[in-house]
């Protein structure tokens, strides 16, 4: 049973809270600042309800703020719900700025306060899980180059990289788009005897076919219109180093022949040239297509496949790296939060569920992009599904719904729509709507006023 510290000098209210929450929580009671701090140090509860008017200055807030600051100094992640009088909004906002999680105005409604307390425990546990995952980034994970992971599938990939790196033979990396094929190639290069030489990447599918031969093998002066100077190709630039041929499955048939010759003889001829040029480079290739199927269809040479695939590494898709999804998500969240100077504490429960159940067709690259987007979009302490670009309640994505709007307009629109939907869903029941949205009733009223959804009259 979770521990809840109630700091309240009124015996009547203390008894009310004790009666209302004794079945749900293990209660700790205090009636002044010193006893509150003493019980907090001993029991370290995750959530505290704190009356600002404590003895000996019941009409002031000095002791209440001393308690708040003391609790947060001992454990800054504690969720403190400040309880104030109806006319004490200024101190309530000051408490939020000091570090309180939320405020609640008297008179107390046990159901409404209970919703806020429940959400506070919920958020604390989410943040605690995220802190543990971030800690695991340094303590429990395997790192290699720009890659990170701890699941068995990626651990096996890292082990294979260490084995193949010292050799000089070609390597073929197979994996879906976004799985990190170039990172694997760079890791192999950095652990090889060629690590002091150049690493030269080229995407065979991104360069027009009529330019690809020149890009790979270079051209002589006058080889074609516009060839005003001699230009070495990528193969020559990779001398004494590693040439990375990304998406080799897209290589045209005529260039497959020329690449095969280079692999066999270690010599090449530039476009328009007649002299054989000897080049010492290691070839690492990668593809996201099924090479065996391409061979059957006559789209890829079988003899070239055997040359480039002496050693093979198959990268697992992100959906098969279940243990790494939240690990990577938290790594990206930490990085982008620092980049954009945002103070995000983690992912909501619904966001975690979606991250872990989503199929990830774009793999690690898609995860990184979604988290970056979420850091930009989020205005809360935790990332919600809408921030990540997952489906909204209406079934549309954030990106398609708000095309052409400024970031501020998008934020206001999302906030207004979520409030409107929650109120409509609960047929005007503010307590239930505020519970679903994770804010207190006074906070929800303020937001409703802001968006023109509520009138004080």
Image (cartoon, rainbow, N blue to C red):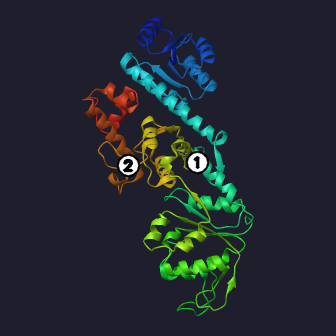
Above or below, comparing residue 356 to residue 440 in the picture:
below
Q: Residue at x 58, y 38 (%)?
A: 133
Q: Position of residue 436 (x, y in %)?
A: 36, 31
Residue 335 disc label: 1
Residue closest to the eye, 90 or 310 = 310
Above or below, comparing residue 212 to residue 186 in the picture:
below
Residue closest to the eye, 383 or 260 = 260
Residue closest to the eye, 225 or 46 = 225
Q: How much space separates mark 2 and mark 1, taking CA atoms?
A: 24 Å
- Is residue 26 visible in the rendered structure shown here? yes
Residue 428 relative to residue 285: left or right: left
Pick whichever of labels 2 and 1 is earlier in the sequence.
1
Quarter-of-image position of residue 243: bottom right
Q: Residues within 10 Å of mark 2 (few under 14, many from 20)?
A: some
Residue 389 relative to residue 369: left or right: left
Q: Residue at x 64, y 54 (%)?
A: 160
Q: Residues within 10 Å of mark 1 (few under 14, many from 20)?
A: some
Q: Under tag 1, what secondary structure?
A: helix
Residue closest to the eye, 404 or 138 = 138
Quarter of the rendering occupied by the C terminus: top left
Q: Position of residue 118 (x, y in %)?
A: 44, 23
Residue 373 relative to residue 66: left or right: left
Q: Residue at x 50, y 47 (%)?
A: 320
Q: Under tag 2, what secondary structure?
A: helix
Quarter-of-image position of residue 222: bottom right
Above or below, comparing residue 178 to residue 321 in the picture:
below
Quarter-of-image position of residue 63: top right
Q: Position of residue 212 (x, y in %)?
A: 53, 79
Residue at the spot of label 2: 410
Residue 412 relative to residue 211: left or right: left
């Amino acid at each position: 049973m979770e521990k809840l510290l109630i700091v309240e000098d009124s015996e009547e209210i203390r008894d009310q809270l004790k009666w209302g929450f004794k079945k749900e929580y293990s209660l700790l009671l205090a009636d002044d600042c010193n006893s509150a701090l003493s019980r907090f140090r001993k029991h370290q509860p995750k959530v505290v309800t704190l009356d600002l008017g404590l003895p000996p200055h019941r009409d002031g807030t000095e002791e209440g703020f001393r308690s708040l600051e003391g609790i947060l100094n001992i454990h800054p992640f504690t969720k403190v719900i400040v309880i104030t009088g109806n006319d004490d909004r200024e101190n309530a906002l000051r408490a939020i700025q000091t570090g309180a999680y939320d405020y609640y105005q008297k008179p107390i409604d046990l159901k409404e306060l209970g919703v806020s307390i429940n959400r506070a425990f919920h958020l604390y546990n989410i943040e605690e899980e995220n802190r543990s995952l971030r800690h695991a980034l340094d303590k429990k994970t395997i790192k290699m180059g720009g890659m990170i992971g701890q699941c068995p599938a990626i651990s096996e990939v890292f082990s294979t990289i260490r084995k193949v790196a010292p050799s000089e033979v070609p390597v073929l990396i197979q994996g879906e788009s976004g799985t990190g094929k170039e990172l694997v190639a760079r890791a192999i290069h950095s652990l090889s005897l060629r690590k002091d030489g150049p690493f030269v990447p080229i995407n065979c599918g991104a360069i027009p076919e009529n330019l690809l031969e020149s890009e790979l093998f270079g051209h002589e002066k006058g080889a074609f219109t516009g060839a005003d100077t001699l230009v070495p190709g990528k193969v020559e630039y990779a001398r004494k180093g590693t040439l990375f041929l990304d998406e080799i499955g897209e290589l045209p048939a005529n260039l497959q022949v020329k690449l095969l010759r280079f692999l066999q003889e270690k010599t090449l001829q530039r476009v328009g040239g007649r002299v054989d040029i000897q080049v010492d480079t290691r070839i690492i290739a990668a593809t996201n297509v099924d090479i065996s199927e391409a061979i059957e269809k006559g789209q890829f040479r079988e003899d070239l496949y055997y040359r480039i695939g002496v050693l093979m590494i198959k990268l697992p898709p992100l959906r098969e790296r279940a243990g790494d999804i939240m690990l990577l998500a938290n790594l990206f969240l930490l990085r982008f939060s620092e980049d954009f100077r945002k103070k995000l504490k983690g992912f909501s429960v619904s966001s975690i569920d979606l991250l872990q159940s989503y199929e990830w067709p774009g793999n690690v690259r898609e995860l990184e992009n979604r988290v970056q987007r979420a850091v930009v979009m989020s205005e809360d302490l935790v990332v919600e599904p809408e921030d990540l670009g997952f489906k909204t309640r209406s079934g549309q994505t954030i990106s398609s719904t708000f095309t052409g709007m400024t970031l501020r307009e998008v934020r206001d629109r999302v906030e207004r729509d979520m409030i409107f939907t929650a109120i409509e869903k609960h047929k005007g029941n503010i307590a239930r709507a505020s519970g679903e949205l994770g804010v207190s009733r006074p906070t929800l009223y303020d937001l409703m006023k802001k968006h023109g959804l509520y009138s004080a009259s």
